[in-house]
Amino acid sequence: MVTPPMLTVVTGPPCAGKSTHVRRHAQCDDIIIDLDRIALALAHEGTTHHAYPPHIRHIAINARAEAIRTALPLSRDYNVWIIHMQPSKRDWVAYKQHDARTIRLDPGYEEVMRRCANERPAWVSTTAHEWYAHA
């Protein structure tokens, strides 16, 4: 049986495994919108994951917003995966209008903070702590 195309929004704190989950489940012709991959595409080739400067992150956030606006109507015909750490109320409205399926990943505060310390620049730990404060 062929499953119909779907919009999937993957949420959760930094280092929860959102990108890994999408990488494991998306197919080669699926649309994947990932802020970090967009930022890396805008940064110098030698830039490491999450180590791009704030001005590049700012541009990437705007590029992601436009990519989402463009991809939402395409979710009728293609699988669309959106990695979105903490969607706003406005984002949720748009996602629900397109019948989004939500996957929330959260391995727990201690594990996230361990991953942040081992795998990311220091600012990511602050972002993770803020995510839990507002979750």
Image (tube, grey):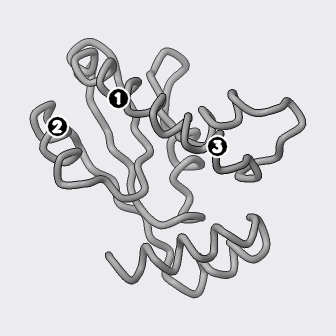
SS at mark 2 in the image: helix
Judge whether 99 appears above or below 29 on screen: below
Residue indicated by mark 2: 94
Could you tell me which secondary element the residue under label 3 belongs to? helix
Please, which residue is most extreme toward the front here? 55
In the image, residue 96 sits, relative to residue 119, either above or below, namely above
Query: N-terminal of the two: label 3 or label 2?
Result: 3
N-terminal label among 1 and 3: 3
Real-space Cα distance between discs 3 and 2? Answer: 27 Å
Q: Are marks 2 and 1 in contact (CB under 8 Å)?
A: yes
Residue 59 image-quadrant placement: top right
Give the x, y percent position of residue 55: 64, 43
CB atoms at circles 1 and 3 under 8 Å apart?
no
Residues packed near mark 2 inside 10 Å, few (<14), some (14 to 19) or many (20 plus): some
Kindly identify the amino acid type of the residue bearing the numbered disc 2: Ala
- The disc placed on residue 68 is 1
